[in-house]
Image: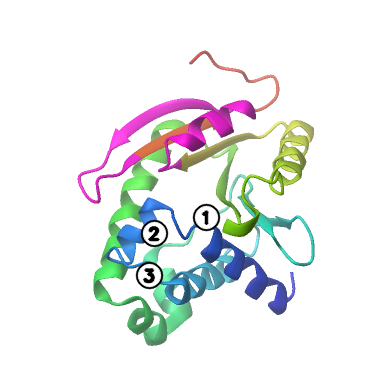
Amino acid sequence: MQPEDIAHFADTLSDGFGMYGLFRFICNGNYSHRKMQMFWAVTIALNKGAICIADSKDANSVLIYLPPGSKEPSIADYLKAGGLKMLFTLGLRSALKLLWFDDLSQRVAKRHKTDKDGYLMAFATRLSKQGQHYGKPLMEALLSYLDSTGEGCYLETLKEGNVGLYGHFSFCPVEQLPLKKGGLTLYAMYRPGKGKEKEY
């Protein structure tokens, strides 16, 4: 991935998650494309082992997958990579909310994900392109990869409507957790590796 690709991916993710409850909560109810674009650019740069795919050079839809053994960066990693600029851009309240959610989501993941499972970190389509099937080929490419490697895959979403979407791709709900902040509910989902199916 080239530096200009990171910028495209970050812009698409920031746009695609513009109506997503978690990021509106993190931005204190007033979603900031600029703040989230910086967050995603640093996220992608920190995850050097991630598999990042887009539908085209325009990156109308993007997907980021962390293979087994990848370590998701902590908030400390983000601040180290982005320095004071990132802290000032996000603001202290937003940084603390990210820290809170990062800790909570990692605790939930530990209940369902093993070190032999990957993690679907992000999957988004630009708002103007949503509902036009830009993301479907990306998910199909990921599933083909997972089937070839036998890896299981874990994800979480905070949008109830996404549960059915991921269910269509063989992800099973494994936990539903109402959050104490932001009026959000976390839906944890898991797709077993090939030959490692579980009963849910």
Measured in 3D between alpha carbons, the distance from the residue under mark 3 to the one under mark 1, in whole angstroms, is 13 Å
- Between disc 3 and disc 2, the foreground one is 2
Q: Residues within 10 Å of mark 3 (few under 14, many from 20)?
A: few
Q: Residue at x 69, y 78 (%)?
A: 3
Secondary-structure class at tag 1: loop
Magenta segment includes 167: yes
Between 148 and 173, which is closer to the camera in this rendering? 173
Percent of width and height locating residue 148? 79, 34
Percent of width and height locating residue 54? 73, 57
Left or right of 16: which side holds 1? right
Residue 192 visible somewhere in the drawing: no
Tag 2: amino acid: Phe
| Magenta range | 157-185
Measured in 3D between alpha carbons, the distance from the residue under mark 1 to the one under mark 2, in whole angstroms, is 22 Å
Q: Which residue matches tag 1?
A: 71
Q: Residues within 10 Å of mark 1 (few under 14, many from 20)?
A: some
- Between disc 1 and disc 2, the foreground one is 2
Q: Residue at x 71, y 63 (%)?
A: 59
CB under 8 Å between discs 1 and 2? no
Between 165 and 110, which is closer to the camera in this rendering? 165
Left or right of 54: which side holds 115? left
Task: Give me the disc on residue 23.
Answer: 2
Task: Give me the disc on residue 76.
Answer: 3
Whether 134 is drawn above or below 92: the answer is above
